[in-house]
Image (tube, rainbow, N blue to C red):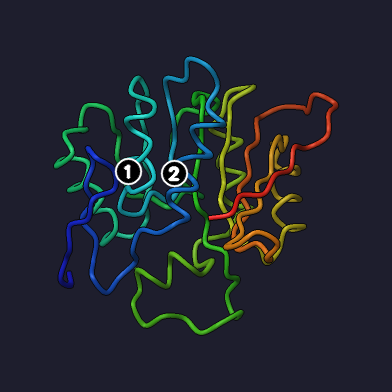
Amino acid sequence: MSELERVHLTRTRHLWQRKRGHRTGTDDILCAWAARCAAPAETSRALELGAGQGAVSLILADQLPQVHITAIEAQVVSFELLERNIRENDLDARYDLRCADLRRAKFEPESFDLVFGTPPFMPMGSGTLPQDAQRAAARFEMRGGIEAYCEAATRALRDGGGCAMVMDAARPERYEEALSESGLSIERITSVVPTAGSAPTYLVYEAKKGPSEDRDVERSTLAI
């Protein structure tokens, strides 16, 4: 494993990551925020799909102190860092860590209150793969894209359970179709922009499992 660095995520949580590999960023913060918003009242079980090094759920851990988190990550290099980060943040008792492909991972169906993730957003062939395998898998759909994430989320969630996904802003029609066709009802879409009036860089989706409540999807804009 290449050289590591230790970074502070919050006042109470830190993260080990590779200096020249996949690194935590704005999308992790947005996903933790969206997961907190999407979590139903009295959430006790959450599932993170494609957990990477654990940044999202580490940020979320203090916001939902009662929640037990199952974290699934396929890449061995990321999974080893995930294990270290959970251990060093003294959260072992609150986690179930699984090194597995989310498309084939086994878990009790319809047993989670909340599912969240940041799927890779670049289809294969849409750009040049980074030479670093960890960075490549975090950006490109090497193990499926948002459709695979939504299918896994629907399988895992109880009726009425919440779901949060963060994507880039390139293919909104595809993202909305993937969510709705899997049985997830979109409740809010937040367009994240670098400055007021500019084009969005991220789209944050909050959804729930089950039919919509016959109301329009809430749409908002967040400048960061």
Whichever of labels 1 and 2 marks the residue nearer the N terminus, that label is 1
Q: Residue at x 16, y 34 (%)?
A: 90
Element under disc 1: strand
Q: Image point 49% across, 46% down: which residue?
A: 31
Residue shown at 49%/48% (left/top)? Answer: 30
Kind of residue sitting beneath label 1: Arg
Q: Is residue 158 left or right of residue 90?
A: right
Query: Dot 2: within a 10 Å radius of its alpha carbon, few (fewer than 14), some, or many (20 or more) residues?
Result: some
Give the quarter of the figure containing the N terminus.
bottom left
**Neighbours of disc 1 within 10 Å: few (<14), some (14-19), many (20+):** some
Judged from the image, the secondary structure of the residue bearing numbered disc 2 is: loop
Image coords of residue 78 (percent x, y): 29, 58
Residue 103 percent location from the top left of the image:
51, 50
What residue is shown with label 1? 98
**For this rendering, which residue is in front, 191 or 126?**
191
Q: With respect to residue 176, does 206 lie above or below?
A: above
Asked whether 17 or 179 is in front, the reply is 17
In the image, is residue 48 above or below residue 42?
A: below
Indicate the position of residue 132 as horizontal and vertical percent values: 33, 77
Q: Residue at x 46, y 28 (%)?
A: 108
For mark 2, what is the residue? 105
Q: CA distance from mark 1 to mark 2?
A: 8 Å
Q: In the image, what residue type sits under mark 2?
A: Ala
Residue 125, above or below 181: below
Q: Number of numbered discs present?
A: 2
Marks 1 and 2 close (CB-CB < 8 Å)? yes
